[in-house]
Amino acid sequence: MAYIEIIFWVALFIIFYSYLGYGILLYFIIKLRRIFGLAKKFEGNDDYQPEVTLFVAAFNEKDYVDEKVKNSKSLKYPQDKVKQVWVTDGSDDGTPEILRKYDGVEVYHEDARGGKIGAMNRGMQFVKSPIVIFSDGNTTLGEDSIQEIVNLFKDPKVGCVSGEKRIYQKDSDAAAGAGEGLYWKYESTLKKWDAEWYSVVGAAGELFAIRTELWEEVEKDTLLDDFIISLRVAMSGYTIQYNPNAYAIETASANVKEELKRKIRISAGGIQSVVRLSPLLNLFKYGRLSFQYISHRVLRWTLTPLLLLVIIPLNFMLAYNSGMNPMNIYTLLFYAQIVFYAAALIGWFLENRRIKVKALFVPYYFFIMNLSVFLGFRRYIKGNQSVKWERAKRG
């Protein structure tokens, strides 16, 4: 049983490290850096106001474009320095026609649909400002978002800035909304610490910006455009910074079925990204960036979900070997797993009901996240995840 014990504890450590351990490690690293005066400091300065382009790749967004354009025009930044570029390739619901009603909005449209990355590759030729800010058509930006983003570009080492993704929270949220909201709060904290230590490992597509000169055309079948674009900027010697004061708000997925659909395509894109960014796994070349990337992203998309399956039979064998002694550590851990997955099952039963204790949905969301990795991997291997994603329904 000795070798089974070793495998079990190594697997358990990796699982713990992937979801909590890395966060704990970051917490102490940041605390120590602050004590020794090594913390990064970015001072706000409204005098720094370069021209920017708000870039939106939109497909059939007629229900959102009016609100999005009005929101963009209301942001606290000199409007003569803000250019709006919309690429609406493939839209057939009247989106481009609605957009053309607005002054100062450039609309580029082709009938053929090439997916979001196709629209981005084609549309970047029309961007002339030094900074381009990407955002989704169905998100609302905080009024200071542009200024908060450009402030970080004062540092010449910064090549990309990620804003914060926020989820509208309601007391009546279903499991998807509660889980997604809690997940993004935790992720936002990790991103703040990642940035303070060195660099964020991937930007959120809802709101991120790069120096236009660093743009490189991305492969046409890319699934996670924001992730690939931002990390390639980091691999070229720049850092990705994070500013939660620049934020994009959207509603949560309508239900767990819709959230699972979204997570599966993200997982398929995650596997694709790990393959395409394989040089970034080289710790000797990329140092801290590689360590952050592996700890925060790669493990969650590859090894950890598999180990979650592996430790169940291993744990049972070890507990059974102890006679299922309730005071034995292996028995306690096995029962803890049973309780956790039972809580996930309860979350399934309570899906779409009014929430009294939101924490009940955390195990269910955690289960959905890891299930999506297996389904996403299968989809990636089969090659049937289209770059033309079907939008998940929002609450």
Image (cartoon, rainbow, N blue to C red):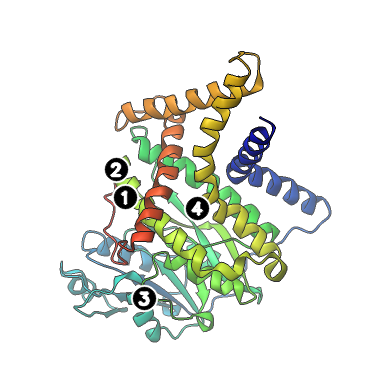
Q: CA distance from mark 2 to mark 4?
A: 20 Å
The residue that disc 2 covers is: 257
The residue that disc 1 covers is: 261
Residue type, mark 2 in image: Lys
Q: CA distance from mark 1 to mark 4?
A: 16 Å
> In the rendered structure, are the residues bearing label 1 and label 3 in contact, judged by CB atoms less than 8 Å apart?
no
Image-based side of 89 in relation to 298, left or right:
left
The residue that disc 4 covers is: 301
Image-based side of 161 in relation to 288, left or right:
left
Q: Residue at x 25, y 75 (%)?
A: 89
Considering only order in the chain, which callout, 4 or 2, is on the residue closer to the N terminus?
2
Residue 71 lies in what quarter of the image?
bottom left
Considering only order in the chain, which callout, 3 or 4, is on the residue closer to the N terminus?
3
Residues packed near mark 1 inside 10 Å, few (<14), some (14 to 19) or many (20 plus): some
Badge 1 element: helix
Q: CA distance from mark 4 to mark 3?
A: 22 Å
Q: CA distance from mark 1 to mark 2?
A: 6 Å
Find residue 266 and report its horizontal and vertical position in percent: 40, 56
Residues packed near mark 3 inside 10 Å, few (<14), some (14 to 19) or many (20 plus): some
The answer to whether one can see residue 295 in this image is yes
Q: Residue at x 33, y 70 (%)?
A: 116
Residue type, mark 4 in image: Trp
The residue that disc 3 covers is: 220
Badge 2 element: helix
Find residue 254 and report its horizontal and vertical position in percent: 29, 43
Considering only order in the chain, which callout, 3 or 1, is on the residue closer to the N terminus?
3
Q: Residue at x 69, y 49 (%)?
A: 26
* Camera-side mark, 2 or 4: 4
Q: Tell me the quadrant of the picture where the N terminus can be found.
A: top right
